[in-house]
Image (tube, rainbow, N blue to C red):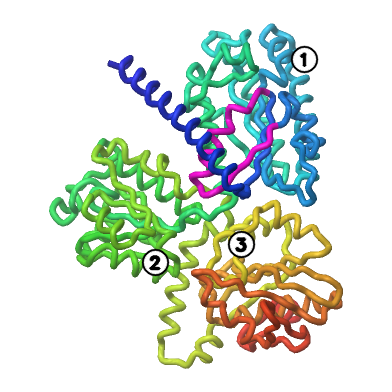
């Protein structure tokens, strides 16, 4: 029976491989017929032949909304590519059209002699291999210093050298030790490099299977070591990395309770009768809660949408010792008998995020279909019928992928809860002026440094409402602007008596003599309506004024979502000239009196 199952899986994989290749050919034909301009240009380099990756990564990027094109460096020329990537990829444009470089390497190719010597007992072989690893790090560092785009490089998988047998009884002290040492040292080295992302080929190989990923015939003929199915997996993984680096992930997971957070119906079974704990099926629900808690620690908001008596649900949170989540982890909840699409819209409004930022998890086909029909922007995940498959639900559906986690991410739930308290205070019987004065707002406005880069990139790529131009940029592009004498990248941090908002604003200014162009001005919607936009503009104006700028100009580029910022220029004294707005730096509004800025904080 197992053999039949494996054979069926292989046949399905083979069909998918053929489909992917056919779709890529069709995409190339369409692109050439309409002269479609590429939106993402990727350079591929490897210590092995990497051309087979092109159709699989290409199709994945097309499905993600890109128009990709590829350049492939010569075979086994990684060091030369890092040192002279323009020549390797045939790039002559300035600025270069190439936006991403992906490098795949294997121990088998770069350290074959050292590996062979090590398994034969040569005590110096490993240190020699580590020296080669130093050389590879230096090459990647050179690439990083000269190439402005994204750089992704692999973690080496277990060697497939003919002299290596993973099932050898001496493997733990032989090739296994060699691989683990190189793996650990390489990860440490890449961690010291700024803006280099890792593709974990070792993990992919273990997931796919060492034997299943090998193609000995193609390696002998073409120096191409992998099966088509494994190239397909590599393409999908690279697409995940590129999407996580360039687009915002979902912000909130909205959970049903009965048969989702626990097994059974609390209204019928009571706290003692639900399935939740160390034994199956309760262990599956507990494992799912652990995954949700991990998402919460990475900045994902957790909300509840359950048709239940509210008291019953909170009783489980309070009394059941199998619960992993507690009430403090929940950013918003709608526990009632109203339609769930209505409740989820209220959750989005309460958290001040769009419906397209939500992932809804429920065990009911009716609730899932109703949500899809009435709130099509919401991603819906159906709880598996067999609880054993519930812990893998979020792993299979990777809507919360992110490459980095900031302090703002980790504290997001607490920030949103503080926002609710602010809202309650705002609703008290006091004027808006009195309320703003009561907040004791503080604003820090300064030029961005390396430690702010990840958070700034997040805001640039996910802020929609208060965003004058909605220009999206990668981490590498923003880093290049920070290092440029022509640009100034500012950040805004804020706090009040209820808590810390964190880094909530980004301003990018291009300076040319006495004139500055406001390329980007954006703020998190969590801080709108408090005068921080004026404080931020005033702080930027003060800084660029010190550099001799007398006038500042900018544009408002309208989108479907940035209407809240449509009147920004006019309300701040700018005059419109054609598509641009211009103002004298000296005549811009000063920081509102209810906000204390960093300069005032320092002087006090």
User: In the picture provided, is 106 more to the left or to the right than 215?
Assistant: right
Q: Is residue 376 left or right of residue 400?
A: left
Q: Is residue 423 above or below residue 406?
A: below
Q: Which stretch appears magenta?
A: 48-72
Give the residue at mark 1.
124
493 or 35: nearer the eye?
A: 35
Dots 3 and 1: beta carbons under 8 Å?
no
Classify residue 223 by image quadrant.
Answer: top right
Q: Label 2 neighbourhood size at 10 Å, few (<14), some (14-19), many (20+)?
A: some
Q: Quadrant of residue 127?
A: top right
Q: Residues within 10 Å of mark 3 (few under 14, many from 20)?
A: many
- How crowded pointer 1 is (Cα within 10 Å; few <14, some 14-19, many 20+) is rated as few
Distance from the alpha carbon under mark 2 to that under mark 3: 21 Å
Could you tell me which residue is drawn at 76 percent across and 43 percent down?
Answer: 144
Alpha-carbon distance for marks 2 and 1? 60 Å
Give the structural element (helix, strand or loop) at label 2. helix
Tell me what residue is drawn at x 52 percent, y 40 percent. 27
- Whole-angstrom CA distance, mark 3 to mark 1, is 49 Å
> In the rendering, which numbered label is found on residue 348?
2
């Amino acid at each position: 029976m197992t053999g039949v199952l494996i054979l069926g899986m292989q046949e399905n994989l083979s069909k998918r491989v053929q489909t992917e290749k056919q779709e890529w050919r069709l995409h190339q034909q369409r692109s050439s017929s309409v002269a479609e301009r590429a939106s993402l240009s990727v350079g591929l380099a490897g210590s092995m032949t990497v051309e087979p990756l092109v159709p699989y990564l290409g199709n994945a990027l097309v499905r993600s909304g890109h128009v990709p094109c590829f350049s492939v460096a010569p075979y086994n020329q990684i060091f030369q590519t890092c040192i002279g990537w323009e020549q390797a990829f045939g790039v002559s444009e300035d600025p270069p059209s190439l936006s991403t470089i992906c490098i795949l390497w294997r121990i088998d190719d770069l350290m074959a002699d050292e590996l062979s010597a090590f398994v034969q007992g040569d005590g110096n072989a490993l240190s020699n291999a580590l020296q080669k690893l130093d050389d590879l790090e230096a090459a990647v560092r050179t690439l990083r210093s000269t190439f402005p785009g994204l750089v992704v490089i692999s973690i080496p998988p277990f060697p497939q050298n003919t002299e290596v047998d993973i099932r050898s009884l001496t493997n733990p002290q032989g090739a296994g030790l060699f691989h683990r040492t190189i793996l650990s040292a390489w990860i440490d080295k890449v961690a010291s490099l700024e803006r280099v992302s890792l593709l974990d080929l070792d993990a992919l190989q273990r997931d796919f299977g060492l034997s299943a990923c090998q193609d000995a015939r193609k390696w002998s003929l073409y120096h191409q070591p992998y099966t088509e199915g494994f190239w397909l997996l590599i393409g999908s993984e690279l697409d995940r990395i590129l999407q996580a680096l360039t687009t915002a992930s979902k912000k909130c997971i909205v959970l049903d309770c009965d048969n989702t957070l626990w097994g059974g119906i609390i209204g019928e079974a009571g706290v003692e009768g639900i399935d939740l704990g160390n034994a199956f099926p309760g262990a599956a629900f507990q494992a799912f809660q652990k995954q949700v808690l991990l998402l919460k620690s990475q900045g994902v908001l957790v909300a509840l949408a359950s048709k239940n008596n509210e008291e019953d649900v909170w009783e489980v949170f309070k009394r059941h010792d199998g619960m992993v989540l507690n009430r403090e982890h929940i950013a918003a909840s709608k526990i009632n008998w109203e339609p769930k699409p209505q409740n989820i819209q209220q959750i989005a409004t309460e958290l001040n995020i769009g419906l397209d930022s939500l992932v809804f998890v429920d065990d009911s086909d009716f609730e899932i279909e109703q949500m899809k029909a009435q709130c099509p922007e919401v991603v819906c995940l159906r709880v598996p019928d067999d609880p054993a498959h519930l812990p893998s639900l979020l792993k299979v559906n990777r809507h919360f992928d992110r490459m980095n986690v900031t302090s703002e991410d980790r504290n997001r739930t607490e920030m949103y809860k503080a926002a609710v308290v602010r809202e309650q205070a705002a609703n008290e019987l006091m004027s808006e002026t009195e309320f703003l004065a009561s907040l004791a707002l503080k604003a820090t406005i300064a030029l961005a440094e390396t430690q702010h880069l990840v958070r700034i990139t997040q805001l640039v790529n996910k802020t929609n409402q208060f965003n004058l131009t909605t220009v999206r940029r990668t981490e590498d592009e923003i880093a290049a602007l920070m290092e440029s004498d022509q640009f100034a990248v500012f950040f805004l941090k804020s706090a009040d008596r209820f808590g810390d908002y964190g880094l909530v604003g980004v301003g990018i200014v291009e300076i040319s003599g006495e004139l500055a162009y406001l390329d980007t001005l954006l703020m998190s919607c969590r801080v709108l309506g408090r005068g921080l936009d004026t404080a931020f503009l005033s702080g930027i104006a003060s800084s660029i004024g010190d550099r001799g700028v007398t006038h500042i100009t900018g544009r408002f580029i309208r989108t479907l979502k940035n209407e809240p910022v449509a009147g920004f220029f006019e309300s701040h004294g700018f005059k419109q000239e054609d598509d641009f707005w211009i103002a004298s730096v000296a005549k811009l509004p000063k920081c509102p009196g209810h906000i204390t800025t960093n300069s005032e904080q320092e002087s006090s």
